[in-house]
Image (tube, rainbow, N blue to C red):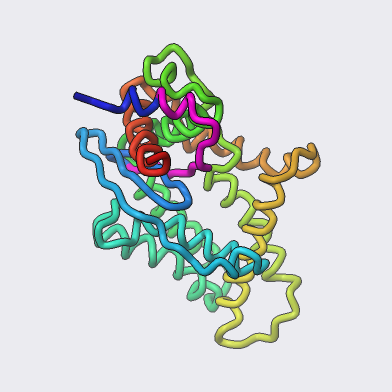
Amino acid sequence: MDETPQMLRRGDAALALPRLGGMARPNGVVIVSEHFWAFAGTDGSLREGTMPKPPEIVHSLPLARGLVRLGASLSPMFKRSGVAPPKERLLILFAILAPIGFAFLPSPWSTIGGVSISLLLLFTILRGRALHLHGAEHRAIAAAEERRLASTWQGTAKPSRFSPRCGTNFAALALPVTFFADRVLPIMPAFWSPLVVLVLSLALTMELWRMVQKSSSKLWQAFLVPGLALQRLTTREPRLEETQVALRAVAAVLARELS
């Protein structure tokens, strides 16, 4: 007997729920909390794991805390028992590190290389049903935040498929931050400079993203507009069965968090 509906009703009644995040895969949805992750497959499968636990002191260190959080968000992909096959893990790692090498290429080859890798990565991540499952992931997380998990499972509620915490929003912020850092930061030309610029840009973007998510000011919220607009391309309206895939992952994480 499927216990997911019962767990979702329990989540709706809980006084407090953990903050959830996630990612869509071509064959399922990953949902993560600070402590646990779960992957629900479109074939009915379910895989679970624990999130890494960085030292407490890291959470109080500007820049470092953002990089640690970014790395932790990718852990369900890169663990041996994770959701990405070995070849895909290598491709994603290559896409992350390739911009360092492209920085040494003359223009316009560096730009062409960067765009090509980005398109390849997007095709890999968003192939198959991933666009619909991406929308389902956002809907399931919004349902938890709005305490409408049970009604969303039944299809009587449809929370938004757009999310202010989506990685698309992070990417939309990272591009201008990296462009600015590459041209303004006073780093002398050296072999390691592109790596320093990349790491520092990601850390600065995470700090900016953190402030945007904590603030209710319309000025800060304006930083989310480009990412939310991009989500019209990176998500599709999910069908009920796709939303239920994401909700099964939510229920698995909540079952461990509320136990």
Q: Is residue 131 above or below residue 167?
A: above
Q: Is residue 254 above or below residue 153?
A: below
Q: Residue 26 is drawn in which quadrant?
A: top left
Indicate the position of residue 8 as horizontal and vertical percent values.
39, 26
Q: Residue at x 55, y 74 (%)?
A: 103
In magenta segment, residue 148 = no
Indicate the position of residue 60 as horizontal and vertical percent values.
65, 65
Q: Residue at x 40, y 54 (%)?
A: 121
Looking at the picture, tell me which residue is in the foreground, 157 or 208: 157
Q: Is residue 176 above or below residue 251?
A: below
Q: Is residue 154 above or below residue 220?
A: above
In magenta segment, residue 21 = yes
Indicate the position of residue 75 as horizontal and vertical percent values.
39, 59
**Highlighted magenta segment, given as a residue range:** 9-25
Q: Horizontally, is 21 left or right of 39 in the view?
A: right
Image quarter where the N terminus lies is: top left
Q: Horizontally, is 109 left or right of 193 in the view?
A: left
Image quarter where the C terminus lies is: top left
Looking at the picture, tell me which residue is in the foreground, 178 or 253: 253
Q: Residue 2 is drawn in which quadrant?
A: top left
Looking at the picture, tell me which residue is in the foreground, 227 or 117: 227
Q: Residue at x 43, y 35 (%)?
A: 137
